[in-house]
Structures are given as C-alpha cells and as structure tokens.
Image (spheres, helix red, strand yellow):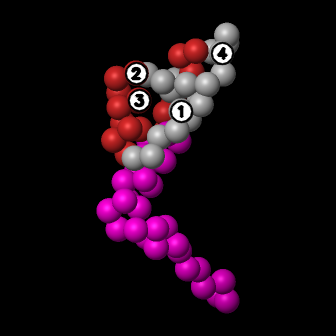
Amino acid sequence: MLDQRLLPTEEKYLTLRSYEEVATRLRRWCAVRGAPAIGVSAAMGLALGATSQWGPQLLIWEYDLST
C-alpha cells in the first residue's frame, strides 16, 4: 500500500499482512486518501481477513462457461 501521507516528497510502500494492519492504517494513520483508494484498501483487508479465517481456497471461484 502506498503511504500517501508522504507524497509528493517521498514514495514509501507499506507491507500489510493482516486485516488488522489494514484497518489500523485506514482508521488511525490515514495512510490512504481518496474514495477509490480507500475502497480498494478495504476490499484487500476483507480478502486478507477471509483467507486468514477460511484459507485461500475461499477465493477460488469456478465458472461454468458452457452456457
């Protein structure tokens, strides 16, 4: 995640490995600004939380393309 607080003078990326880290950065540190970036960050936090709870197989979707 790009830490937008440091722009435009510095470009620093944050490595967030859990939904708790994502939530903390969004809520307390305001590391992300702008509705689209906040939405994408929140979705990634949800995906991290889901995979930590149920495993990566939750994100594998099967589609029947024959119809």
Find out whether the residues at labels 3 and 2 contact each other: C-beta distance under 8 Å.
yes
Disc 3 versus disc 1: distance between alpha carbons? 9 Å
Q: Can you identify the residue that label 3 sits on?
A: 25
Part of the protein shown in magenta: 40-67
Q: Which mark is residue 29?
A: 2
Kind of element beneath mark 1: loop
Labels 1, 2: front one: 1
55 shown above or below 62: above
Instruction: Residue 50: say if magenta.
Output: yes
Instruction: Residue 6: say if magenta.
Output: no
36 shown above or below 63: above
Q: Can you identify the residue that label 1 sits on?
A: 14
The residue at the point 35 percent across, 31 percent down is: 24
Kind of element beneath mark 3: helix
Is 67 on the left-hand or right-hand side of 59? Answer: right
Kind of element beneath mark 2: helix
Quarter occupied by the C terminus: bottom right
Q: Tell me which amino acid carries mark 1.
A: Leu
Give the mark, 1 or 2, whose residue is nearer the N terminus: 1
Find out whether the residues at labels 3 and 1 contact each other: C-beta distance under 8 Å.
yes
Q: Tell me which amino acid carries mark 3.
A: Arg
Q: Which mark is residue 47?
A: none
The residue at the point 48 percent across, 24 percent down is: 31
Q: Can you identify the residue that label 4 sits on?
A: 10
Disc 3 versus disc 2: distance between alpha carbons? 5 Å
Quarter occupied by the N terminus: top right
Give the mark, 4 or 3, whose residue is nearer the N terminus: 4
Disc 1 versus disc 2: distance between alpha carbons? 12 Å
Disc 4 versus disc 2: distance between alpha carbons? 16 Å
